[in-house]
Amino acid sequence: MLSPLRFGVLGVADIAVRRTLPALATIPGEAALVAVASRVLPRAVELADEHGVRAYGSYAALLADPAVDAVYLPLPAGLHGPWIERCLLAGKHVLAEKPLAVDHATTVRLLRLAAGRSLVLAENMTFPFHSQHAAVSRLVAQGRIGELCSLHASFCVPPRPDGDIRYQAALGGGSLLDQGVYPVRAALLHLGSGLRVDSAALRHDPVRDVDLGGTARLRGPGGVEARLEFGMDGEYRCHYELTGTRGSIRVERAFTTPPEMTPQVWLQSGSGASHALELGADDQFARCLSAFVAQVRTGVAPGGDSRHQAALADDIRSASYLTSGSSL
Ligand SMILES: NC(=O)c1ccc[n+]([C@@H]2O[C@H](COP(=O)([O-])OP(=O)(O)OC[C@H]3O[C@@H](n4cnc5c(N)ncnc54)[C@H](OP(=O)(O)O)[C@@H]3O)[C@@H](O)[C@H]2O)c1
């Protein structure tokens, strides 16, 4: 039997503490946390002590640890690319937070660097791993909503605290890269990779120089359409809806379903009334981690979805006209 893949974490990030490390602890046969690094040693020590693992006061020190096979990288978006590169050059597999990099060219370059070194680089885009989305895909494939015509997806969150990494242009902040990549990924998941951006708009904060939200309209083969919205300046919205010629499917809390939550998926088919599907809870973070471990074990790491997502994010940015968003 293979021993668990040994993970180190770069940065005591909220998402690591709240979601990824608890999920990692649920798959002990597959993966184990062995080290934590922070720019501030006491912060690393506090988290490392909770898990009974080694602490480092710099990211470079963790990368020099030969007992670390793979790095989980939950840094601000603008630091993903540079630190992914350093991890790969140090011979580590990398599971990086979304997005892998701030643009398509860097994403492609990093995936090639990983492949050239026989290392796995994967994006911790977890929601597609929740079994509810495969259930949705099966219903579509069975023709339960007829011919698929459109997807409408939203991921919007209320304003973040001042000083949040998402408000800092130098750290790759902005809503497109933070929330926008989720509806983009939902479109790729259900409509495939042949999508093109028709039009887009970003609400730009002139003081912080980041986008606070936006919308995009995409079109796919056969005229199928995606309408996407994202933001960090309004009410919480986290859902998608697929509409077909004879019905629709709506998924609530689509991108952030907690592991204990019963999925909220409604099907309206033909002349029938809309009804909730009976689906089981699932831990999308644990499933994503398991998939990463399997990729390391088999040496097969597709990376295609991350590439397409990065290309569409680039296209949304360049197709966008800017409106002025509010600034604090
Ligand atoms: N997959 C998901 O569902 C999901 C959900 C939320 C967030 N995320 C992603 O995870 C990443 C982190 O998000 P978060 O909300 O967890 O952020 P966060 O709490 O602010 O954590 C970011 C960490 O990055 C490190 N860091 C290094 N240089 C930094 C700098 N110059 N300024 C600030 N922090 C710096 C810090 O760790 P040290 O000080 O310990 O070194 C910090 O704790 C982002 O890329 C975000 O998009 C993913």
Image: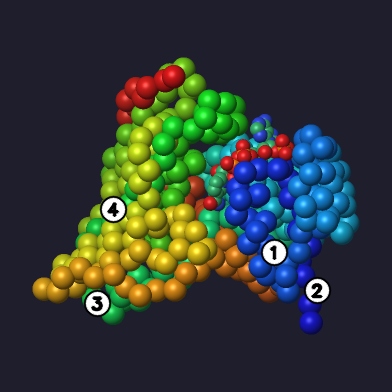
Q: In the rendered image, which quarter contains the C terminus?
A: top left
Label ID, residue 152:
4
Of badges 1 and 4, the one in the foreground is 1
The amino acid type, in three-letter code, at marker 4 is His
Residue receiving disc 2: 3
Cα distance in 3D space between marks 3 and 2: 43 Å
Which quarter of the picture shows residue 32?
A: bottom right
Of marks 4 and 2, which one's residue comes earlier in the chain? 2
Mark 2: is the Cβ under 8 angstroms from ligand 1?
Answer: no
The amino acid type, in three-letter code, at marker 2 is Ser
Residue receiving disc 3: 143
The amino acid type, in three-letter code, at marker 3 is Gly
Q: Quadrant of ligand 1?
A: top right
Cα distance in 3D space between marks 4 and 2: 43 Å
Of marks 4 and 3, which one's residue comes earlier in the chain? 3
| SS category of the residue bearing label 1 | loop
Q: Residues within 10 Å of mark 3 (few under 14, many from 20)?
A: some
Where in the figure is residue 66, as x and y percent of width and height?
Answer: 88, 56
* Residue that appears at 35% across and 54% down: 239
Cα distance in 3D space between marks 2 and 1: 15 Å
In this view of the protein, can residue 222 be seen by the observer?
no
Of badges 3 and 2, the one in the foreground is 2
Residue receiving disc 1: 25
| SS category of the residue bearing label 4 | strand
Where in the figure is residue 232, as x and y percent of width and height?
Answer: 42, 36
| SS category of the residue bearing label 2 | loop
The amino acid type, in three-letter code, at marker 1 is Ala
Of marks 3 and 2, which one's residue comes earlier in the chain? 2
Cα distance in 3D space between marks 1 and 4: 35 Å
In this view of the protein, can residue 233 be seen by the observer?
yes
